[in-house]
Image (cartoon, helix red, strand yellow):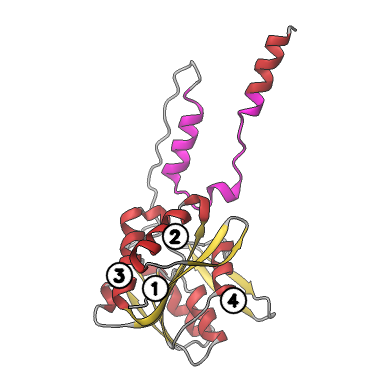
Amino acid sequence: MNQRNKKNKKDKKENVKILGPEDLMHLDVASVVDIVNQKIKGNKKEVKKIKPEGFEHYYTENPTSEMRSKKLKLKLKNDHEYIFKSVTGVYGKKKIDKATRLLIENAEIYGENILDIGCGYGPIGITLKKENPNLKMYMSDINNRACDYAGVNAKDNNADIEIRQGYLYEPWEDMMFDTIISNPPIVAGKKVWQSLIEGSYKHLNKDGVLLLVAYHNKGGKRIQEYMENIFKNVDTLQKSGGIRVYKSIKEE
């Protein structure tokens, strides 16, 4: 085999990228399919594109997927443990993800009126309430199934929390908070997470805090920049494995 052929084979190997779970966990099915289709574009043979059928996002208001529940355990660094019931059709149904864990462990809570927006089945708000009993915790999600299971988990963990269903701040039109916290649904699109940040400024008291978590190179950098744009300040509280916890303060 001549040197040119050896070089070509080496180049092809170097161009191969292996995508693991951490690369794909924040992508929806359509996005994964797009990546696959881009990878096979160079193939001379015509390949029919794959189209997902019957797929529902976890931010669907009324999921129609078959309900299957699973118990998940969250163990904190202080050795406190909490059990949650997750369910299909809701974010994080298989495990409590690293971003959620990092946010819970590093949340700098200000004041006593706290809103967990896009709460899913409730691990963030419920854990923070249990760790800080004097907080007045509120949680909401657009997903009815998520709200139902957040209620179940709050009851099972003996956490007194008010839970409402609705899109972003619609359930809280007349309410103000000291801290708003979220693992935002980046895959829901820019309009959603930008509206979450914009609305937080309107619903925070003076000196109130917005806490968000995201993979920095998978949408988090844009979130950080938008928080800076809206609040005129943003800090990184913690970073680990590509995940960052961002904090903005309403100073005016």
Q: Nearer the viewer's eye, disc 2 or disc 4?
A: 2
Q: Residues within 10 Å of mark 1 (few under 14, many from 20)?
A: many
Name the mark on residue 147: 1
Instruction: Give the residue type that dot 1 points to.
Output: Cys
Kindly identify which residue carries mark 2: 224
Going by the numbered disc 2, the residue's amino acid type is Gln
CA gap between label 1 and label 2 equals 27 Å
Q: CA distance from mark 4 to mark 3?
A: 31 Å
Left or right of 159, for residue 165 = left
Q: Which residue is mark 4?
A: 83
Q: Quick one: label 1 or label 2, which is nearer the N terminus? A: 1
Whole-number angstrom distance, CA of label 1 to CA of label 3: 20 Å
Q: Using the rendered view, name the quadrant where residue 62 is placed.
A: bottom left
The earlier-in-sequence mark between 4 and 3 is 4
Q: Position of residue 40 (x, y in %)?
A: 50, 26
Label pair 1/3, CB-CB below 8 angstroms:
no
Identity of the amino acid at label 4? Ile
Can you identify the residue that label 3 sits on? 199
